[in-house]
Amino acid sequence: MKISLFIPCIVDQFAPQTAISTFKVLRKLGCDVDYPFEQTCCGQPAFNTGYHHEAKICAERFLKIFSKSNYIVAPSGSCVAMVKNFYEELDLSKETLSIYQYLKNNIFEFSDFLVNILKIENINAQFNAKVTYHDSCHLLRELKISNEPRKLIQNIKGIELINLNESDTCCGFGGTFSVKFPELSAAMTEEKVNNIEKSGADYVIANDVSCLLNIQGILKKRNSRIKILHIAELLALGM
Amino acid sequence: MSKDNLIERFNKEIIKVNGECFVFKNIDDSITQIQSFIEKEKIKKILINDKNEISRSIYVNLKRTTDLIIQAVSEINIKNKDIKEELKDVDLGISYANFLVADTGSVVLTSSEDEPRLLSLLPEFNIVLSTSNQIIEKLEDAIDVIKTEKSVTVITGPSRTADIEKVLITGVHGPKKLIVFIFDK
Amino acid sequence: MNELDTKYFKKLVKEKLSDKSLRTIVKKATFHSLQKRNETIQNDISEKWEQLREKAYSIRKITIENWDYYFNQIKAKFSENGIDFFYAKNSSEVCDIVNNLLFSYKAKNIVKSKSMVTEEVGLNEYLEKFGFIVTETDLGEYIIQLANERPSHITAPALHKSRSEIGFLFSEKLNIDYTDAPEKLTDYARQILRKKFLNADVGISGANFLVAETGTIVIVENEGNARLTITLPKLHIVITSIEKIVPTLSDALILLRLLPVSSTGQKITSYVSFINKPEEEDNSSKNLKKIVVILLDNGRSKLISDKKLRSILYCIKCGACMNKCPVYQLIGGHAYGSVYPGPIGSILTPWLNSFKDSKDLAYGSSLCGACSEICPVKIDIHYQLLRIRKYSIEKKFSPFIEKIIFKIWLQIVKNYKIYNLLSNILCFLGPLFQETGLKIPVWSKYKYFPAPFEFSFHKWWQREVKTQEEYANV
């Protein structure tokens, strides 16, 4: 199966290990993985702040770069939701609109792709740890994915998946929001981290690097022993 | 749904909303129930919608067996009187329902000369009479009545509020207790 | 304290965030409502909730898309039913209409049951200026009126107040011994308000649905104060907004299945009043009581004509989006500074009030979408927040520096070579900040900001995969 990797810019620079793990897991599962090298950003930061003109330029660029891809897979619910759902809000040109109509059905978040396209729920990994899972907002609400990652996690040998209280409540990142309302964003993250700490887990797992780094922002401030881990890394770790 | 099922369902639902429901085979049993209620709640004055065989006979029975002030709506000739004034000291209003709704445990009342809207609202206690034939499954089944009457009130349990720290209090502006009598022969 | 105005949203947020007892009380209350809602949906609703939402959505969609048709239909029905009807373009028109009515009825004492639209209009303040005695009769509204505040939630106006605060308020304003027992406080209010009801000349209420097919006014409540408001006085004035119309009575009954569940977790409220025609006064057929309906526009018809924005008016005012919103839970309703707080308030207010002064509301959200998910009529709330942000940029309301940043940013992401060059520099410097994290103004006060990794994925790919593959392909 031919796959094009879509690596969000934040992952590219801040968490390349997540991208590498995504690549390795997909490779191991027999996929032919390609990385369109010209990709940069899907345009979400501009779009979320209201800069549709700038976002549109990014979107059209993105669509052209991936126009030849069979499947696009990204280790992020948020950026996939941007392309799949929010591009609809941009006034795309005729040319790119037709690419979009085709691509929006072929772009998948990593765990979604594993479980629903490759039909793999168990990748025969092992990892001895107590983990808990945070539902990233766009993954959960825009892409409706919540069981897929949980299945993948639960099938790892030696792992204990602990329920996270209010797992579907936002971690408080929200891109622009965290810059414009830093106090409010931090208060939300504090609540999230309180729940994570109460869970007793060693690791907090999520499918979005942006949420994880934001959560880490408070964990580190508190000198917490709890570590963040992206699902792709978790799966790659135990393989 | 069979009649027994409807009664059972209605009973289950009205309990959930802090209401009460009694099923009677005959009028005499209901009189005993009202009498003990009068005693327990220290009722002094009753106003009853008497435009019906059942309520008429309850009215007469009560008149005979208690020495409280019991008035029938038909007697007070509200055409010339201010119903507000009439209801001022009434602490138990006895209404007659158009329908009971099994799905929600609700009482459907239409306003009329016999069933002034305030009867089920101003007194501290409200007893609603009906027969098992009047139970409908869903509120939708009463839609024709809702369309044609001047006004229809759907009552589900006693008056309530949770405006102070979400603590549930019954009996804010309306009745503190709502009791439904179902006559099932 | 800052004045309650959307202009001060950012300041109010900070102020409310530091009020820990407010946070505790708001969280407890919203959780309570949410929990009851979820339990009822799980245990007590026979239909599938999602199907019910879908139905409700299509009812609201059809109504708003064909609003002018239903508006004309209901106007005709009202006149057929003997109900007086007014369309008010803006708040001052509502005030004038009410004022004239009150004068012609020689009214003095007015009782009110909950109507958010009268809050929007500022009716109480207006009427008090003319010497009318206006009493709010919903317990929550009464508390708020005594405290001289504004509702902090559309269905639970006094949600932000603790029982002891209410206790002190009652003891001060009503001259009674202090108690914080909710049942005692409620009983005091009952006694006082009962007298007000018996002496009232006019009753003013809101309405939850107005049925076009029949001209039925539907009013949903729990306390019985709305029933008293519409029954006791000779004149009943209904004040609500133009989008409250629903096509048929069965449509209204479907929406009625969703409204109380979403709001308080009740399958149905204690009382639902359906009013078709005025009753005879004292049951003498000559003197009919009077019912007057006033519908406020205030910018709504303009919203209706905008295909992308009109879904905002699908709202049936249940308040579930507030209960569910992680931002609302932390700051409460007053922080927004608007009449309608929370997510729905943030998307409605900028279009009704000064856009410039209230656009910030749309930025005070992480766009998590919890509001859209819980909304019983499926309003795309977080998309609407994004649309306000877009409009704000189009209108050039953005900070200058932000504009420059996005201009530069675009030049970088448009060209992968520049992007990679900068990315490599950042990643090269990254390890220097690994321990301390990057110092970002304000952010770093609260959170550690991560440093870039020592290499980017682009770099890794180039090094590890691309070279190998190119080699293999040769």
Image: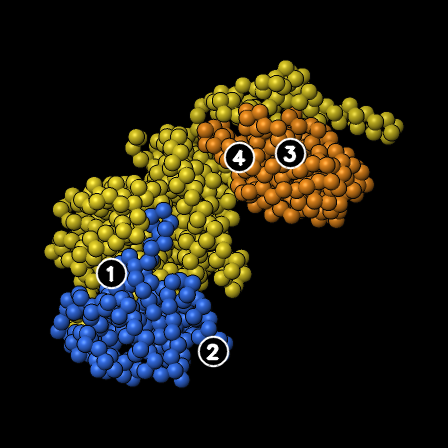
Is residue C330 among the parts visible in the rendering?
yes
Query: Which residue is the site of mark 4?
Result: A194
Circle 4 SS class: helix
Q: Residue at x 55, y 24 (%)?
A: A221
At x 32%, y 52%, the residue is C241
Q: In whole angstroms, how far apart are the C-alphas of marks 1 and 4?
A: 47 Å
Amino acid type, residue under disc 1 in the picture = Leu
Q: Which chain is blue?
A: B
Locate residue A68, reporting x and y percent: 73, 39
Instruction: Tell me if residue C201 comes above or below residue A109 in the rendering.
Output: below
CA distance separating discs 1 and 3: 58 Å
Q: Judging from the image, what secondary structure is the residue with disc 2 in? A: helix
- Look at the numbered disc 3 and give the secondary structure of its residue: loop
| Amino acid type at image mark 3 | Asp
Please state the chain letter of the residue tagged with numbered disc 2 in the rendered image: B
Of the pair B72 and C198, the residue shown nearer to us: B72
Q: Which residue is mark 3?
A: A202
Question: Which is in the foreground here, disc 1 or disc 3?
Answer: 3
Query: Is residue B27 rendered to the left or right of residue C366?
Result: left
Q: Secondary structure at mark 1?
A: helix
In the foreground, B80 or C397: B80
Q: Nearer the viewer, residue B176 or A237?
A: B176
- Within 10 Å of disc 2 (Cα), the crowding (few <14, some 14-19, many 20+) is few
Disc 1, disc 3: CB below 8 Å?
Answer: no
Mark 2–mark 1 Cα distance, whole angstroms, equals: 35 Å
Q: Which residue is mark 2?
A: B4
Supply the letter of whichever chain is yellow: C
